[in-house]
Image: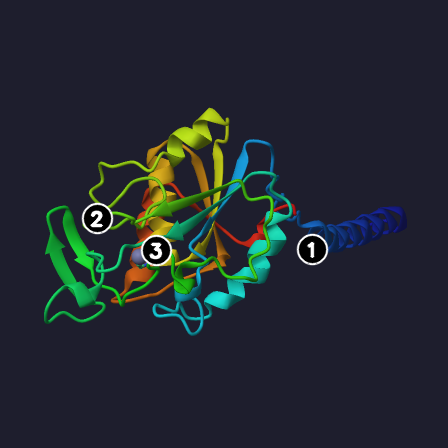
Amino acid sequence: MTIIERRRFLLTATALAASSAFSGFALAQTQPAAPKIKIDDKSVLIVVDVQNCFLPGGSLAVGKGEEVIPIINRLAKSFVNVVMTQDWHTPGHVSFASSHAGKKPFEMIKLPYGDQVLWPDHCVQGTDGALIHKDINIPHAQLVIRKGFRKTVDSYSAFREADRKTVTGLSAYLKSRGLTRVFVTGLATDFCVAWTAMDARREAFEVSVIEDACRGIDTQGSLAKAWDAMKKAGVKRIQSGDLAV
Ligand code: VGL
Ligand code: ZN
């Protein structure tokens, strides 16, 4: 190597080292954050069953259910379109363990329309337990769908009752308003949220469940099973922080 060659070599080597160090630095600094999901005029927030019976002190309290309330209130401010659901059972409802001699809550029975989990009495029409929790602050919500109001048929889903035939009218309501993007929150992740989300997919809506705005009951592995089924159905699993709110 001549002196000149040696100088050129050293210069090139230094430049390469500097540039690769720099690009490594640049890569670490500018890793793009996933773009936030924008809420548009085709988006609707569904707030499922945030009712006294499912909250602390309620007859079917969902663990940490109260934690969803501030999250849902905050999210709802960014949605023009909000629908709430209300579990709304008759006294002596078929889904209550107390309606079946010798049966206990969380046992399963067979009904004409299929398997039914039995629950403690909850959300009886017109009782305080059935009220939407007082801390839910969404005055602009436009519709409350009451479900499970027939004595002999349960309804986890806000779209279709447990006989899988009777519709609630929610699909037609959303479609006639041009609402195609559904964001589901509330209680309980593994029952009413999951069934609502999967039925929304079946009705061809784009569906996201906002995980941290939901809490589950988780009886006999039901929470993991529900997430699995939702994934298969094409439901997106997102966090409230993924939304541009
Ligand atoms: C629900 C069980 C029974 C729910 C309603 O809101 O997830 N779970 N009824
Ligand atoms: Zn119920």
SS type, badge 1 = helix
Which residue does the numbered mark 2 point to in the structure image?
A: 153
> Residue 167, image x and y in percent?
29, 36
> Residue 12, image x and y in percent?
80, 48
Direction from residue 26 to residue 88 in the image, left or right:
left
> Residue 198, image x and y in percent?
34, 43
Direction from residue 14 to residue 216 in the image, left or right:
left
Verify CB contact (< 8 Å) between mark 2 and mark 3.
no
Mark 2 and mark 1 lie on one chain; the one further toward the N terminus is 1
Query: At label 1, which amino acid type do we have?
Result: Ala
- Assess disc 3: are there few (<14), some (14-19) or many (≥20) residues with their C-alpha within 10 Å of its C-alpha: some
Which residue does the numbered mark 3 point to in the structure image?
A: 125
Which residue does the numbered mark 1 point to in the structure image?
A: 28
SS type, badge 2 = loop
Quarter of the rendering containing residue 93: bottom left
Direction from residue 140 to residue 234 in the image, left or right:
left
